[in-house]
Image (tube, rainbow, N blue to C red):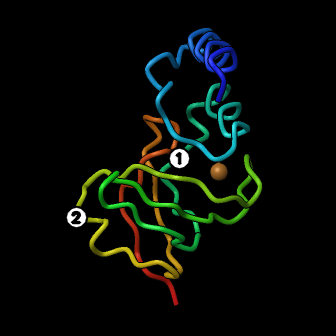
Amino acid sequence: MTRTTYSVLILALAAAGFSTQVSAQMDHSTHTMPIAAKPAAASSAMEEGVVKKIDKAGGKVSIAHAAQPSMPAMTMVYRVKDAALLDKLQAGQKIRFSTDPADGGMTLLRFEVSQ
Ligand SMILES: [Cu+2]
């Protein structure tokens, strides 16, 4: 990301009242729009996805999530609420998971393996 686009992103997020979320890692910038427009839309409902990569050092996990009302299917990098979750996740797992609406759904709260 160039310095210019980064600045623009900061301004856009600040204007939307999300100035604290600048460091959030997203694979798709489109994710920002529904979050900023409708915080309440990011409910705690379970989402479906497939675990792609676990980054224990970074405390993150990549999940290819299924299409949702506000978003097409895509792979996104999530933080985890509890680092212990990273020990239970395995690449290739099909899971149902919930995320934290407080940060726009970018933090994995819990998951269950689906068959
Ligand atoms: Cu997404």
Q: Position of residue 86 (x, y in %)?
A: 31, 66
Reply above or below: 57 against 12: below
Residue 70 is left or right of residue 25, and the answer is right
Q: Position of residue 27 (x, y in %)?
A: 64, 47
Reply above or below: 31 against 13: below
Most extreme residue toward the bottom is: 115
Which quadrant of the view contains residue 90?
bottom left
Which quadrant of the view contains residue 49?
bottom right
Judge the density around disc 1: few (<14), some (14-19), many (≥20) Cα neighbours within 10 Å.
some
Judging by the rendered image, the residue that carries numbered circle 2 is 84
Judging by the rendered image, the residue that carries numbered circle 1 is 43
Q: Position of residue 55 (x, y in %)?
A: 38, 61
Q: Position of residue 114 (x, y in %)?
A: 50, 84
The residue shown at (47%, 51%) is 78
Quarter of the image where the N terminus is located: top right
Which quadrant of the view contains residue 9?
top right
Looking at numbered disc 1 in the image, what kind of residue is underneath it?
Ser
Q: Secondary structure at mark 2?
A: loop
Residue 69 is left or right of residue 107, and the answer is right
